[in-house]
Image (cartoon, grey):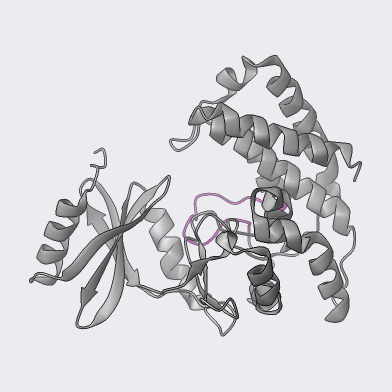
Amino acid sequence: MTAEPVDLEKARLFLGDYFGEAVSDVSLVGEGAWSKAFGFLRDDRNFIIRFGKYAEDFEKDRYAATFTSTYLPIPKVLDVGSAYGGAFAISERHAGLFLERLDAESTVRLTPNLLRLFDALRDVPIDQDGSSEWPTNPARHLSWEEWLCTSVEDDDNPRVGGWRGDLAKDAEIEELYVRGVKALNSRVKDCPRALHLVHGDLLNRNVLVSTDAQRIEAVFDWGRSVYGDYLYDVAWFTFWGPWHEGLRALDFRTVFREHTSDVGLDVSDYEERLACYELQIGLTHLAYNTVINDLVERDRVARRIDVVLASGQ
């Protein structure tokens, strides 16, 4: 069954059926590649309901809530189920500003607690004998190295598969992709085998901060999460930094390196690991932008990959 598009009226109808009574203040609050979110009010409390194709993303959100802590606040998921040929999830709603929309001054003000967020992710206990895949996806058992290498291959998955032929039609992009994959495969040897909790997408409206930019209010959308090297989340900031004013001004690469020294964290091959993960991020987004036919953004990503390759790290 194909998931139906869900508009505001369908969201109201579903919520009325679900609770057995009408809820108030239902409104569209966000829409991403894989889901659409509506806010609503019930018993004077704010909630979110999301509708999407992939229940496994919502299950990961529900599982991720078990990791919540002071510096890693994760909204509780109250229910996950089927709706309109797809899936739904109802969760607590938090308020705040999106991290990537902060200006330079606000980003600097947030930095101490942003670094504590990274510490909290790293401190979540993980089974070191497990795979990079979460328990919500028991069918796959990949090591961190295997996950990195296979993630840049076209596996015809229903979300973003089938891109390889179209990418190859552009000779320059094809050459860059082949060169990037070769460099990535040569650098995975520098990556540690110790596993940590990796969110995998700490931008794109997935982190809310307080209006005074003093604290993290919520971390959500765990659909891309894996177990791997905690520096992957750092690389997400360093790769996409040029896209965002606050991160551009912050120089998170240097900030996090200094933080590891301050907290006594021994980080070997720091630049090599970041370069490896930046390549993976760039290559997967060459594929993604090929799938959605955003050639302007794909060219911008390509230029960023060129910078990473030219760095020689």
As rendered, which of 208 and 125 lies closer to the eye? Answer: 208
Q: Residue at x 49, y 35 (%)?
A: 160
User: Residue 159, image x and y in percent?
Assistant: 45, 38
Residue at (55, 35) in percent of width and height? 288
Residue 60 seen in this snapshot: yes
Q: Is residue 78 above or below residue 294?
A: below
Q: Residue at 65%, 77% (x, y): give it.
A: 120
Residue 107, position in %: x, y?
66, 68
Where is residue 35? Give x, y as percent.
36, 50
Which residue is at the front of the view, 128 or 250?
250
Residue 140 highlighted magenta (yes or no): yes
Magenta stretch?
Answer: 131-144
Quadrant that contains the N terminus: top left
x then y, percent, for residue 274: 80, 53
User: In this image, 112 relative to 191: left or right?
Assistant: left
Q: Residue at x 39, y 60 (%)?
A: 58
Task: Name, please, the residue furthest toward the left.
Answer: 21
